[in-house]
Amino acid sequence: MFEYIKGIVTEINSGYIVVENNGIGYLVYVSNPYSFTENKNYKIYLYQKVAEDENSLYGFKTKEDKDMFLRLISVKGLGPKTALSLFSVGSLDTLVEAIEKEDINYIKKFPKIGDKVARQIILDLKGKLVSKENNIVEDTELVEALKALGYKASDIKSVLPKIDNSLTIEEKIKQGLKLLLK
């Protein structure tokens, strides 16, 4: 599994870019290839999909975008290529807001998203995503660390809003542990 790649974008196409690293060109599917510039260095966060007939890389400019993508592909009936299309228009905050407000019409305007998939996205993700406007952003690293320590997801989610987001990950874990022990 790859976390990210640092390299030079050598080719830009309508659905993907090619990133060269140590003489190897990696084809990386991205939501907006034209937001990249050829012959420029980038750090691109990656998701690798390996299946019987596929070995693909999906790229994101930020860790937050990748985390949102991982949440989206966890939705039943939503594959990586369709989830990537949700990043092509607007901002993540707008998408999160649409999910929280159950705005099916906004979600349905994306390619290959029909009524059934839009409702499934809302069902699976509403309440699990928090807008940056509220200054409470779920830290997946924090959640995974607390799960690894044996705490239930429901208990972790109840203390997340009380954890100070300005802290380092280590400090967040300590604060989370204190809250969970109460």
Image (spheres, rainbow, N blue to C red):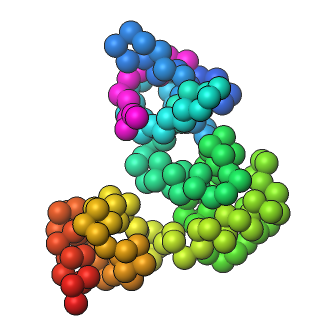
Residue at the limit of the structure toward the top, as seen here: 23
Nearest the eye: 179 or 36? 179
Q: Does the magenta stretch include residue 4?
A: yes
In the depicted structure, whether residue 98 falls above or below residue 15: below
Say which residue appears at 54% left-offset and 32% top-offset: 50
Q: In this view, does 14 lie above or below 93?
A: above
Q: Does the magenta stretch include residue 19?
A: no
Taking the spot 38% from the left edge, 23% from the top edge, the residue there is 7
Asked if residue 84 is positioned above or below residue 117 in the image, the reply reads above
**Magenta span:** 1-11
Q: Which residue lies furthest to the right in this view?
A: 115
Percent position of residue 156, x then y: 35, 76
Q: In this view, does 98 lie to the left or right of 143?
A: right
The x and y percentages for residue 65 are 48, 50
Position of the N terminus, as image quadrant, is top left
Asked if residue 29 shows in the view, the reply is no
- For the C terminus, the image quarter is bottom left
Horizontal side, residue 43 vs residue 29: left or right = left
